[in-house]
């Protein structure tokens, strides 16, 4: 009888705990007063029309994890925080190998953390669009082989993808209602590579709809599917950057080990900078674009977004591979991060843009680099023409989007081109396009021929190379910029960029140092970025997300 009593008490405790956990659910809240207040923001594009998604139900997104999370308590979460929060991949793998952590616990921690913050209307970042329903099962399977894993491996690491990257487990929407049910049969090439290397796909994140080539002057980080993504360093105060807004926000807030962004012109460097994370925009051809909703086959590339440079190199390696279906793809060597990066600036020639020295944080970091032994070469950049950049994006997307829809999208998707999307949105513009679709209208109206486009591309590339000519003439490892100030120039010149946190303004808004290198110089950029990161250690976790 006594044993039966204790059994009943134990069962009651378990079910009470489960009931308690289930109380944390996502509820829609009245955002009227917040929106009225937001209209006073000094930046017009931050005078939001809405915060919450009108189509996404996060209760449904979390439904597959209800039972598992019912047995994962706040105590479990708090005990795991020191092992996971702000830790790099080698540290996480070490904790797993030593038995302090498992891939299953790591995955549950992130799911619990996402739910904890995203279900709180005062802290929610509107950063998640979808979660992989099989992710816990996959993590358990990874635990069976945890003893054989290198510390410099993506194996068992839960990552998030920008929601313009195809995955079999979840739809790929680009944030657009027209693609809400885009259940692709194949993973994107880089996702296949990540899975081959043991990475766990945790879910998909919000983005600026259609990679911010949709509406003009609209908020960064807004999509009709995901709502308005917010910056954890200043909710409703600082911009998230775009278009890989959710990727930057979720890495900054420790919602996953890392995330993938995509860039055409600044879409990795911008959100990485504004969310104080490390972002690499590689040279076109280093990473495959197959299975990614496009803007421009000339300029598009995916790239890793991480909390540290070493993670960036490890993540980058796990996505490498020659893709016969991407005509820009190149065979490239890995970063060899297992042998480490040197922390030495001696003999490193770095170009400093004189007009930027008026920025006190930039100037301070240049002094730090000089003191550490770097050779600082001050540059007065030439005047260049950036005419017809919009034309390049217009005509590429006019031709590239139909190819994706035909070859990579779910066969049930009825839209076949940009005009179909515009017409579809006009049927319910308040829900589907509350900020308009001016850039899509511009694509339809642009009559530039493919022959004329080649001239535009050539001229822009020439102008970009002219601006960055000092890389060759002065034998520089990199030219140093701020945030995404020169991302467009690097893009048209087909140069890689790496952005690394370098400090915070008096307001608390993050600021980053961006290294622009020669084509295919990713290893050198990561080396110098790592040395800078170790020298300054500028990144701080957002205050309300510790």
Image: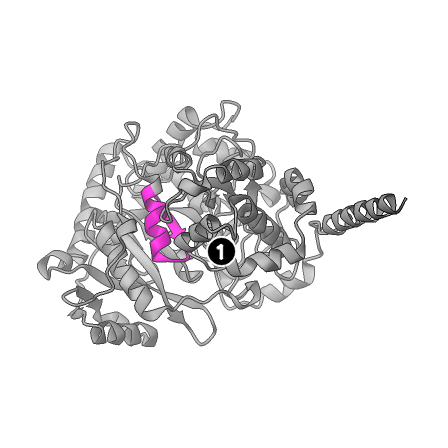
Is residue 475 placed above or below 414 in the rendered structure?
below
Q: Quadrant of residue 451?
A: top left
Secondary structure at badge 1 equals: helix
Tell me, yes or no, whether the highlighted magenta stretch contains residue 316: yes
User: Residue 479 at what x, y percent from top left?
Assistant: 21, 61
Q: Residue furthest right?
A: 1
User: In the rendered view, does 276 fall on the left or right side of 128?
Assistant: left
From what the image shows, is residue 423 above or below residue 483? above
Residue 50 falls inside the magenta stretch: no
Neighbor class of circle 1 (other Cα within 10 Å; few <14, some 14-19, many 20+) is many
Q: Nearer the viewer, residue 336 or 147?
A: 147
Spot occupied by residue 524 in the image (x, y as percentages of width and height) = 22, 54
**Residue 91 placed where, x, y %?**
42, 55
For the record, the magenta segment spans 301-317
**x, y percent for residue 536:** 33, 70
Judged left or right of residue 452, residue 234 is right
- Left-right relation of 210 to 393: right
Farthest front residue in view: 2
Q: Going 28% across and 39% down the picture, which residue do you hit?
A: 298
The vertical placement of 148 against 542, above or below, is above
Look at mark 1 in the image and give the residue it sits on: 249
Residue at point 50%, 53% (across, down): 250
**Quadrant in the picture for the N terminus:** top right
């Amino acid at each position: 009888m006594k044993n039966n009593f204790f059994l009943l008490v134990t069962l009651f405790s378990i079910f009470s705990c489960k009931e308690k956990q289930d109380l944390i659910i996502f509820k829609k809240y009245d955002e009227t007063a917040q929106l009225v207040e937001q209209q006073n923001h000094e930046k017009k594009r931050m005078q939001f029309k809405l915060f919450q998604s009108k189509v996404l139900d996060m209760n449904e997104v979390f439904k597959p994890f209800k039972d598992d999370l019912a047995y994962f308590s706040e105590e479990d979460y708090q005990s795991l925080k020191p092992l996971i929060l702000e830790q790099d991949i080698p540290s996480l793998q070490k904790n797993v190998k030593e038995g302090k952590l498992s891939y299953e616990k790591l995955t549950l921690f992130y799911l619990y953390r996402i739910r904890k913050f995203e279900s709180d209307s005062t802290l929610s970042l509107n950063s998640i669009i979808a979660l992989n329903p099989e992710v816990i099962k996959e993590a358990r399977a990874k635990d069976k082989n945890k003893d054989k894993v290198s510390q410099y491996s993506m194996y068992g690491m839960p990552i998030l993808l920008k929601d313009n990257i195809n995955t079999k487990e979840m739809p790929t929407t680009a944030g657009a209602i027209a693609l809400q049910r885009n259940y692709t049969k194949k993973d994107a090439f880089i996702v296949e590579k990540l899975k081959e290397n043991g990475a766990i796909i945790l879910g998909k994140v919000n983005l600026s709809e259609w990679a911010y080539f949709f509406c003009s002057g609209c908020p960064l980080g807004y999509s009709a599917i995901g709502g308005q993504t917010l910056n954890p360093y200043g909710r409703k105060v600082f911009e998230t950057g775009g278009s890989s807004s959710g990727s930057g926000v979720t890495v900054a807030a420790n919602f996953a080990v890392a995330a993938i962004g995509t860039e055409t012109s600044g879409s990795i460097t911008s959100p990485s900078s504004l969310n104080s994370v490390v972002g690499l925009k590689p040279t076109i051809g280093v990473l495959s674009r197959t299975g990614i909703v496009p803007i421009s086959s000339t300029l598009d590339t995916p790239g890793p977004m991480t909390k540290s440079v070493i993670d960036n190199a490890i993540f980058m390696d796990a996505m490498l591979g020659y893709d016969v279906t991407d005509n820009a793809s190149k065979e490239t060597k890995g970063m060899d991060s297992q042998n480490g990066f040197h922390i030495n600036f001696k003999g490193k020639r770095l170009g400093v843009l004189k007009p930027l020295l008026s920025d006190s944080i930039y100037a301070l970091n240049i002094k730090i680099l000089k003191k550490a032994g770097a050779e600082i070469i001050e540059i007065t950049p030439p005047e260049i023409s950036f005419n017809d950049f919009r034309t390049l994006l217009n005509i590429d997307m006019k031709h590239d989007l139909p190819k994706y829809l035909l070859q990579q999208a779910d066969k049930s998707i009825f839209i076949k081109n940009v005009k179909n999307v515009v017409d579809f949105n006009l049927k319910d513009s308040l829900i589907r396009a509350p900020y308009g679709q001016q850039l899509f209208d511009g694509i339809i109206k642009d009559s530039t021929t493919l022959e004329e486009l080649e001239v535009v591309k050539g001229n822009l590339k020439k102008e970009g190379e002219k601006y960055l000519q000092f890389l060759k003439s002065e034998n520089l490892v990199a030219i140093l910029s701020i945030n995404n100030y020169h991302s467009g120039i690097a893009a048209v010149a087909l140069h890689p960029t790496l952005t690394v946190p370098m400090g915070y303004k008096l307001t608390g808004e993050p600021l980053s140092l961006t290294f622009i290198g020669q084509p295919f110089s990713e290893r050198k950029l990561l080396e110098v970025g790592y040395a800078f990161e170790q020298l300054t250690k500028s990144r701080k976790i957002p205050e309300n997300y510790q």
